[in-house]
Image (cartoon, helix red, strand yellow):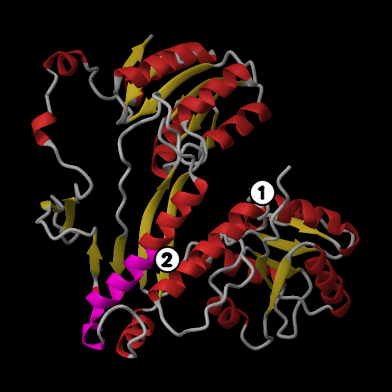
Amino acid sequence: MAHVLVVDDSAAVRNEVSSFFTDNGITVLTAYDGKDGLEKLKGDPAVKLVFADVNMPVMDGLTMVEKIRSDLKNPVTIIMLTTENDPNMKGRGKEAGVKGWIVKPFNGPSVLAHVKKIVGV
Amino acid sequence: MQEESTLVSKVFVHETNTEAFEALKVFFRDNNLVGVRSSNTGVLEVLNANIDLGAILLSDEPDENGKSGIDLGIEIHRMRPELPIFLRLSANSTLDDLPEYTQSVFAASYTLDTLDTLKEQTDKYLFNTHYPSVIVRGIEEITLDSLNTAIRDMDIKCDTPFLVRDKLIIGELFSLIPIESEWCRGYMMLQTEDIEIQRMIQANLTGLSSEESDFRGVNSVLSEICNLVWGGIKSRFFNHNNSEEADSTVKVQVPIIINHAHRYISFGVDDPQLCFRYTIKDKHEKLGPITVYQRFFFHLSWRPEEFKEDEVAVDDMEESGELEFF
């Protein structure tokens, strides 16, 4: 089974999202900013889905996505989980290769079926 | 190529093995570290007196009070979780020999024979950001000039700049201002003690009269220093791009002043602030109520005549929590 990576500078969000997926039988890694997200992704080839915040210190989420595609050349599915709902930002995300966008707060049950399909549960 | 700046970092050391201590002294000298040694009677007292540290070095050998660095590490990690703790191990043991929780307390281990691994760890945890020396020297020059402008007749010096991982507040008075440019974004903070600035005002060493030495006068001195430094940094280090593509909006900033001693915060304006108060009550009446205050400080710009609620955008917005596929 593939793994999920949750990237958010908020410990509360990382805990909420990862606990939900873990309780549903999915293996989850977490990272606290975009730079850490890249490192965690490089270290675990089993990650097939990334949930990422946009506004993070050190490296923001959209910059991380761009680097996942350009530097790591990793086709992992990426869904942004963010307070941002700006069409320009969504456009940048789409151009960078983001597959989905969720405006917080996180609603686990509404995405679970999609996630299970992506990770192969 | 820009030369590396000579930054140091203070590390707290609790080491009772003489050979190890001597080896660490050499290591510190060679690797830009400044050791703060514990005393046998008051390890935690010395630690509490130093709140601008980069790391902690302990040993698994028991000290003169019979306490091992492992137990001390667990205690220190609870108090100062931001500080990486490096554990010197006796030969033939590894961190894997420790229980899982205890392993997580220590950032890394090393032995006297593997000080190169300690160097890797201090580089990773402390010296992991390049600060060009022209910037470090420039900040020091600008700030010394600003302090000399704001404070008369005092001998002002700057210690060797250092890197800190602690997140503890120094003093109870601080001034914050955003630093934004094409190549960097963040904050500058000045921290000091309220009473010390008050004494300088009373001694007529600032631009204020000695009668203005109440906490508002104190705040204004620090705020002005913050402003001078920020202006100097902007002038010297931020590109002045005159091309048409450059954002022509003037990026104004005003220091925020926080004075814990007087429970005071200022954004530099006297206008009333829009405030909301939320009361959170336990439906089952087991917990007392919690009050949350929300305040808005549009001290830099407020042009509501330009606000337009875009009805089309509102209708098109996905409900929060729902996944929108592209």
**Kind of residue indicated by mark 1:** Asn
**Kind of residue indicated by mark 2:** Leu
State the image coordinates of residue B121 (x, y, percent, origin top left).
73, 53
- Which corner quadrant holds the N terminus of chain B? top right
- Is residue B213 inside the magenta stretch? yes
Q: Is residue A34 left or right of residue B174?
A: right
User: Going 81% across and 53% down the picture, which residue do you hit?
Assistant: B117
Chain letter for mark 1, please: B
- Residue B128, numbered circle: 1
Q: Is residue B84 left or right of residue B267?
A: right
Q: Which residues are magenta?
A: B210-226
- Is residue B118 inside the magenta stretch? no
State the image coordinates of residue B173 (x, y, percent, origin top left).
35, 72
> SS at mark 1?
loop
* Residue B163 higher or lower than A32, as above or below: below
Say if residue B81 shows up in the picture: no
* Residue B85 higher or lower than A99, as above or below: below
State the image coordinates of residue A31 (x, y, percent, origin top left).
53, 37
- Cα distance between the residues tagged 2 and 1: 23 Å
Residue of label 2: B190
User: Going 46% across and 74% down the picture, which residue do you hit?
Assistant: B148
Q: Is residue B255 left or right of residue B23?
A: left
